[in-house]
C-alpha cells in the first residue's frame, strides 16, 4: 500500500491579506473573533473614520466596511508601507543633475512630510536655467500640506486648491496656496501610471498652469488616501480615511491625469540633441564622457527625450529676433 503524504491542515486564523470586500467578509468571523463590534466602531471613530452606527450595528462587520470603503482589506498595502517610511528627515529630492545646454534635472521620490519647502528651495536655486525637468515618475507620498507650498509656483497666496473630505465626503480641511512664487524658468514635469497619492495631486494642481508642461503617460487616478488602522486585538484594516476634491478641474479618479504631451517609456531612436564640448578626434575628457553617457540615457527614455527637445526649442526661440 502506498503511504499517504502528510497534509498540513489549513490554519483557522483567518485571511491575513484579503483583497476585496468579499474575501474580507469571508474571513471576518475568525479575524475579529476576539474583538467586540463596539470596540471596532470606537477604534475607527477615534481615528477619524466616520460611519452610521445604526447601519453598522445592523450590518455587523460587513456593514461597517461597506459603509466606509468597499475596497477595504486586512493588512497593509505598499502605499501605506511607503508612507510609514516617510518620517521627518527623509529627502524627497533624490537626485539633482546639471546637464549641458543649461538644463537641470531633479528626481523626486515623492511628496513626503515637509518636502514642499525642500523641492521649492531646489527649484528656486535653479531659477534662470534654460529649464528644469522634475521627474515624478513612480513618486507617491501622503503629505498634502507640502502641496500648499509647491502650488505657489505661478499662483497667488491664499488661492484655494482642493478640499479634503472624510470617507463620508464630509469636509475635513481646505488646502490653499501658502505663498505665491514667481519663477523665470519653464518646468517639465514627468509622470507615469505609478505617479500616485500626493505626487499625483501635486501634478493635478500644476496641470494647465503657465510655464508648466506635463509629459509622459496618464497617472494612477487614485483620489482616495488609505490608512492602516490597528484594532484592539492587533488586526490591521487598511481603508479610506481621506478623499481629495479639486476645485479647478474635473476629478481624475479612475482616469488619471492626461499629460500635455503623452509619450510612453519606450526607446526613442532619434539622435540626442544635448551637445558635448570635445571633438570626437580628441580623447574625451571626464566631463565629455559623462555628457556622452547622459546623451545615451536621454535618447533611450522617450519622456526625457521629449522634455529636453522642448526645452532646447524654447531656448532657441527665446533669442529669436534679438540678433
Image (tube, rainbow, N blue to C red):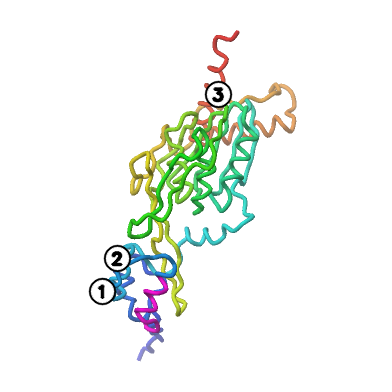
Q: Secondary structure at mark 2?
A: helix
Mark 2–mark 1 Cα distance, whole angstroms, equals: 10 Å
Q: Quadrant of residue 52?
A: bottom left
Residue 289: quarter of image:
top right
Residue at the spot of label 2 = 67
Q: Looking at the image, is mark 2 or mark 3 nearer the viewer?
A: 2
Q: Residue at x 59, y 26 (%)?
A: 130
Q: Earlier in the sequence, mark 1 or mark 3?
A: 1
Left or right, 224 with reference to 212: left
Q: Which residues are magenta?
A: 33-44
In primary-sequence order, the first of circles 2 and 1 is 1
Q: Is residue 97 left or right of residue 1?
A: right
Cα distance in 3D space between marks 1 and 3: 61 Å
Split into 4 quadrants, where in the image is the C terminus?
top right
Q: In terms of depth relative to the viewer, which is nearer, 290 or 23?
A: 23
Residue carrying label 3: 312
For label 1, the SS is helix
Q: Quadrant of the N terminus?
A: bottom left
Element under disc 3: helix
Instruction: Give the number of the disc on residue 59.
Output: 1
Q: Name the N-terminal-most of marks 2 and 3.
A: 2
Q: Position of residue 67 (x, y in %)?
A: 29, 65
For the residues labelled 2 and 3, say whether their Cβ atoms are less than 8 Å apart.
Answer: no
Residue at 40%, 74% in the rendered image = 42
What is the x, y in percent for residue 320?
54, 12
Amino acid at each position: 500500500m502506498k503511504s499517504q503524504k502528510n497534509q498540513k491542515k489549513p490554519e483557522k486564523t483567518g485571511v491575513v491579506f484579503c483583497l476585496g470586500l468579499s474575501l474580507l467578509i469571508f474571513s471576518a468571523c475568525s479575524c475579529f473573533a476576539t474583538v467586540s463590534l463596539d470596540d471596532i466602531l470606537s477604534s475607527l471613530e477615534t481615528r477619524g473614520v466616520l460611519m452610521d452606527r445604526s447601519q453598522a450595528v445592523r450590518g455587523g462587520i460587513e456593514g461597517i466596511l461597506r459603509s466606509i470603503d468597499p475596497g477595504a482589506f486586512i493588512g497593509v498595502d505598499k502605499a501605506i508601507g511607503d508612507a510609514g517610511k516617510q518620517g521627518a528627515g527623509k529627502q524627497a529630492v533624490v537626485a539633482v543633475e546639471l546637464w549641458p545646454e543649461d538644463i537641470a534635472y531633479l528626481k523626486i521620490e515623492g511628496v513626503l512630510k515637509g518636502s514642499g519647502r525642500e523641492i521649492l528651495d531646489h527649484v528656486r536655486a535653479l531659477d534662470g536655467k534654460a529649464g528644469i525637468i522634475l521627474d515624478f515618475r513612480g513618486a507617491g507620498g501622503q503629505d498634502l500640506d507640502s502641496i500648499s507650498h509647491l502650488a505657489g509656483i505661478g499662483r497667488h497666496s491664499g488661492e484655494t486648491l482642493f478640499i479634503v473630505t472624510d470617507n463620508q465626503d464630509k469636509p475635513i480641511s481646505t488646502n490653499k496656496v501658502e505663498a505665491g512664487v514667481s519663477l523665470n524658468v519653464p518646468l517639465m514635469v514627468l509622470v507615469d501610471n505609478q505617479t500616485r497619492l500626493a505626487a499625483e495631486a501635486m501634478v493635478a494642481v500644476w496641470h494647465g498652469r503657465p510655464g508648466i508642461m506635463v509629459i509622459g503617460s496618464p497617472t494612477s487616478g487614485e483620489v482616495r488616501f488609505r490608512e492602516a488602522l490597528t484594532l484592539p486585538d492587533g488586526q490591521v484594516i487598511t481603508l479610506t480615511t481621506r478623499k481629495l476634491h479639486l476645485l479647478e478641474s474635473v476629478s481624475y479618479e479612475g482616469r488619471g491625469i492626461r499629460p500635455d504631451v503623452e509619450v510612453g517609456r519606450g526607446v526613442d531612436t532619434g539622435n540626442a540633441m544635448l551637445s558635448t564640448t570635445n571633438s570626437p578626434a580628441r580623447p574625451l575628457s571626464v566631463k565629455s564622457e559623462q555628457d556622452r553617457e547622459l546623451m545615451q540615457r536621454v535618447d533611450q527614455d522617450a519622456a526625457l527625450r521629449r522634455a529636453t527637445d522642448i526645452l532646447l526649442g524654447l531656448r532657441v526661440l527665446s533669442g529669436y529676433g534679438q540678433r
